[in-house]
Amino acid sequence: MPPVKSLIVVFDGLRPDMVNADLTPHLQAFQAAHARFPLSCCAFPSETRVNAASLATGCAAGRHGVVGNQFHAAAVFSDRWLRTAVREDLAAADAVLPGGLLQVPSLGERLAAAGRTLAVLSTGSSGSGWLLHHRAETLRQLRWSAQGAAHSTPADAWDAIERRFGPPPAAATPQTARIDHATTVLLDYVLPVVDPDVAVLWFTDPDYTYHYRGIGAPETIAALRGVDAAFARIVDAWQRMPDRDQRAIFVTSDHGHITNRERVDLLAALRCDGFSVDTRAAGDADLGLVPGSVSALGFRRRDEGFQRAVVDWLAAQPWCGALFSAGRDADAGVLPGTLNRALLGLDSDRAADLLFTLAHDDQPGDGGWPGGGLHDSDLPDAGGNHGGLHRREMNTVLVAAGAAFRAGHVSPCPAGIVDLMPTALHLLGLPADGCDGRVLGEAMIGGETPACRTRRVAAAAGRHAHHVTVSTAGTSAYVHGGGRG
Ligand SMILES: [Zn+2]
């Protein structure tokens, strides 16, 4: 098979049930015509930068090392958490952490080592764009960010693009103008002029508009129509390319979304019941907290009785979901009553001692779209959110198209964002080993379907029962959801 180049289009946050003939007719027609993966999942936590790193490394968070959208790394910032949306924070971590921020080779590095190229266009945060091609400066390859020249490289490419297409439009809700601009840069500059072996185009909607307006809001409907129209231009251009048989297109989302119910102030709740806790990465309090849809607690007081009391207290709270710690055995966590965080793909020294999710439900949320959960964020109640273990946060859109793939195929196997890098490498004839993800063989002409297995792993902390649902396809592992019960 001659080498096949890949274009990966990321629809940030897109829920699979919002791909339909009304909201996203072009994407709906595209996924029906090509190979799709209804059991596709993001990496856990169901957060953007965790999954940007998973796309860029083919690995789960425990292997690539970006263990949360925000996480404690005391060697980098002792008084606060690392903010992965901010490129400067990531660069600081990359300089300080042993082996760098990403702990495995990236797609950009592996392509460059084989004499091939990656080009990235991002309309997301500076951190998200950086993670997709973190060595672009050194490799002299293209990373263009709508956040500006300071976050893009090489400078002469930024200048050439700005001269020809103008500056990126200002951020807005929805982000359609920026997304249209980035799509034009892809179609009229990156593909014809740079002609990379792999290109990534990141649409920051619908995520951005889901968060601030709600999953069913009129602005969100407009955001969905906006990304669908941009995608239609890409498909149209692809179909007219004379070498389209040597070009594959992948569509993915990096997580789903659910509606924010009430806010739980976790720091206040812990303090109210007498715990000594702060949000610093290093400090004198007994506990260090990073709150979120999945929250992280670091134990600075190491005695077993205290740690057991924290787990028991959490398990007694009506807002508590599933609880995880380092492994005692394959399924159980070392803290009694918790599950092994390796089930989440989060077996890492960078992960906190104790992780817990918040309670969620599948009742109608904003606009009647099912799924909601408690949160501890600055986002509005009734706004969209993600990060936890709701199956609608974990389930993602995944479509593969091109001459190598079966038409009208519906994969029976679990799959996910970690599979994009090995599949793109395979299409170029390069080794795809070393990733947590796999080549999506079942969807390829002449490919094989791996053995698949799904299981529900349960635990109880006192009377608090909780679980996680995980699967494997071949040797690759996926997380589908979890929570109370
Ligand atoms: Zn996202």
Image: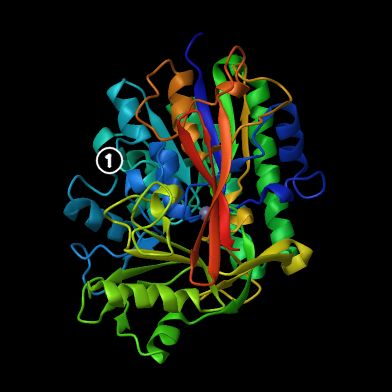
Of residues 470 and 370, the one drawn nearer to the viewer in this rendering: 470
Looking at the picture, how far across and down is residue 190, in whole percent? 48, 32
Residue at 64% over, 62% down: 258
Of residues 224 and 303, the one drawn nearer to the viewer in this rendering: 303
Q: Quadrant of the C terminus?
A: bottom right
Left or right of 484 in this view: 235: right
Q: How many marks?
A: 1
| Type of amino acid at the residue the image marks with label 1 | Glu
- Judged from the image, the secondary structure of the residue bearing numbered disc 1 is helix
- Tell me how the rendering is colored: rainbow
**Would you say residue 204 is visible in this rendering?**
no
Residue at 38% over, 57% down: 333
Left or right of 186 in this view: 129: left
Residue annotated with mark 1 = 137
Hey, which residue is sitting farthest top in the picture? 1
Hey, which residue is sitting farthest front in the picture? 462
Q: Is mark 1 within 8 Å of ligand 1?
A: no
Looking at the picture, how far across and down is residue 420, in whole percent? 49, 33
Residue at 69% over, 61% down: 220
Query: In the figure, 219 relative to 194: above or below?
Result: below
Residues packed near mark 1 inside 10 Å, few (<14), some (14 to 19) or many (20 plus): some
Query: In the figure, 301 relative to 448: above or below?
Result: below
Query: In the figure, 143 relative to 482: above or below?
Result: above
Quarter of the image where one finds residue 290: bottom left
**Would you say residue 268 is visible in this rendering?**
yes
Query: In the figure, 312 relative to 416: above or below?
Result: below
Left or right of 470 in this view: 337: left
Looking at the picture, how far across and down is residue 140, in whole percent? 29, 34
Residue at 24% over, 82% down: 285
